[in-house]
Image: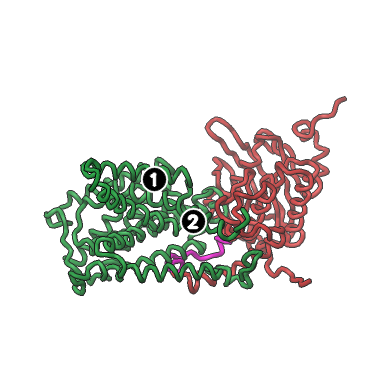
Amino acid sequence: MLGRAYVHSLNSSTVPVGSPILKISDIELRFGGVVALHDVGFTVTQGHIHAVIGPNGAGKSSLLNCVSGLYHPQKGKAVLHTGDGAVTHELTKLPPHRIARLGVARSFQNIELFSHLTVLENLMLGRHTHMKHGVLQSLLWFGPARNQELSHRGIVEEVIDLLSLQPFRHKPVGSLAYGIQKRVELGRALVLQPSLLLLDEPMAGMNSEEKEDMARYVLDVHELAGVTVILIEHDMAVVMDISDRVSVLDFGRLIADGTPDEVKANSAVIEAYLGAEEH
Amino acid sequence: MATATGIHHRTYRAELRLRHTKAEWFRLALVIVLLLVVPYALNTYWLGIANSILIAVVGAVGLNILVGFTGQISLGQGGFLAVGAYTSAILSTRAGLPVPLAIIVAILVTAFIGALFGLPALRLKGLYLAIATLASQEIIMFVVRRWGFLTEGKGYIEVPRLPFIERETFELQWYWILLPITFVAVLMARNVFRTSLGRSFMAVRDQDIAAEAIGVNITRAKVTAFALSSGFVGLSGALSAYYTETVTWERFTLDVSVLYLAMIIVGGLGSIAGSVYGAIFMMLLPALLTEVGQKAGDSIPFITDQLPAIKNAIFGIAIITFLLIEPRGLDRIWSRMKDYVRFWPFRY
């Protein structure tokens, strides 16, 4: 059998491992009278899988939306570090597409794929920030437009291989099974060559076998490419197993932040989320 | 490479081609031969209809780029056709620009106006956007009707016949002018949707929030889509100005916008080929109905008396029937037919 090593790095961050890559501080997000996030702040370290957990409605997705620019918090900021860690970008002031250009890629809780397009087209769209979009070149096709399609195909095929999506390459994603769609969404975020990967419940609604597969893919991405991951997940076993650090939200407030073991022992967390023991 | 198990590509380059199998090349050759033979097989009347179809195809492709591919409903088609027609007519009759240059400028002007009227799309979606584009249609109509400067107060612009066109071979010569232009325009539109630009349009249509999150600048994508679409529409309008030799506002009313919308819906939203099929269908059906009506009218006088009304009714019924049978249009019907032949004698 012919083997070939992947030639494209999936990680575009050059921040040294162990330095902070994302600093979230004092974020407050309100929708009218509803306070979705109140003074939330923590730091994500380069090379970590950083889990964010909490009961439904705790504000986990809202927090992720603040980081990726879909929501603009009334107070506080999220600062991304790039380069050697010294260059900073205030994400809370940027529109989503500019944040994506900085290498922040994400998946969504409810799958948000381009359902009429094929898996391949969805993944190629993940390369959007790396591609040029001239109208004349596109009309002509021959020349730059075609060369660009060909040159970006390499990394897309590597991600297809990594996530075992080969059988579905030319299928419209709308027709695929739920678990596969989740994987395509992960792939679409990966081809961006992220500096920071935000995964919003990548294992929601899956059976345990599919969960294991997905956890394996996330670990592959993290261990092989060294991508820093912020992971929102409900499955405690998965979270405690694979994450380096855990932040716990409850009713829009940060109630704990630490290693999985510290969090597991935290009384506030036990009460809010894991369930208090009977005495 | 096509085998019994499917199409297998050896290179990415080969996969990106528009046609892969011998059957596809054969069908293309057949269409080309047909297009080359058509002008000699048809009489002047039908050749005139063929020419109208060629012009309509360009306009329908333009509208489909916006509505079918980018998901931005537009009722302003008639207005943009008018911008193309008036601009090119004024430039070549009064500013004395050579016709090809006047057409190119008309395309650019229509693209600009289209982008301008596309700005509401940055905040509006769906039916609300439809109303906003309806306003753009009415605004353009108002301007071309009331602004005396455009027609020098005559209410219409007379465009002189192109110098090399003879009266006897008018339709034939026009056919040879329009065919290559339409062919290239359709091919270019097809090209856009195998590049990142076209994909970003479709991303905006399917899931705009996710498109933003992966780095598509939605503002830019929408405005570009409006400009690109209007460019095609402007070309269609400019061609119609020289072909019909008069430009009047009556040919660009809301009816025209709706007719074009019907073309792309019947043909297939989000399909370049569908726009072509839809334009052919919508332009051919009235002519065929007239033909049949006149034949039938010889024996039943009632039909001759009521022909326009009957024509409209049958036209409407035909469209409804099509949409009921296949909401995704003629393009989908055609691909189902191809699949049926390909898998025969199996069902799938």
In the picture, measured across the screen, residue B246 lies left or right of residue B321, that is left
In the picture, measured across the screen, residue B96 lies left or right of residue B122, that is left
Residue in the image at 53% along x and 59% along y: B338
Residue in the image at 28% along x and 42% along y: B310
Whether labels 2 and 1 belong to a single chain: the reply is: yes
Q: CA distance from mark 2 to mark 1?
A: 16 Å
Task: In the rendered view, tell whether residue B43 sits above or below residue B270.
Answer: below
Which x, y percent locates residue B18? 51, 67
Task: In the rendered view, tell whether residue A211 sits above or below residue A82.
Answer: above
Residue in the image at 29% along x and 46% along y: B255
Q: Is residue B348 visible?
A: no
The amino acid type found where label 2 is placed reads Trp
Host chain of mark 2: B
The part of the chain drawn in magenta is A127-139
Q: Nearer the viewer, residue A150 or B219?
A: A150
- Residue B319, disc: 1
Q: Nearer the viewer, residue B309 or A194?
A: B309
Please tell me whether the stretch drawn in magenta is mainly helix, strand or loop.
helix
The amino acid type found where label 1 is placed reads Ile
Residue in the image at 39% along x and 59% along y: B228
Host chain of mark 1: B
Which x, y percent locates residue A136? 42, 68
Which x, y percent locates residue A142? 48, 73
Q: Which residue is mark 2?
A: B334
Q: Quadrant of residue B36?
A: bottom left
Q: Nearer the viewer, residue B158 or A272?
A: B158
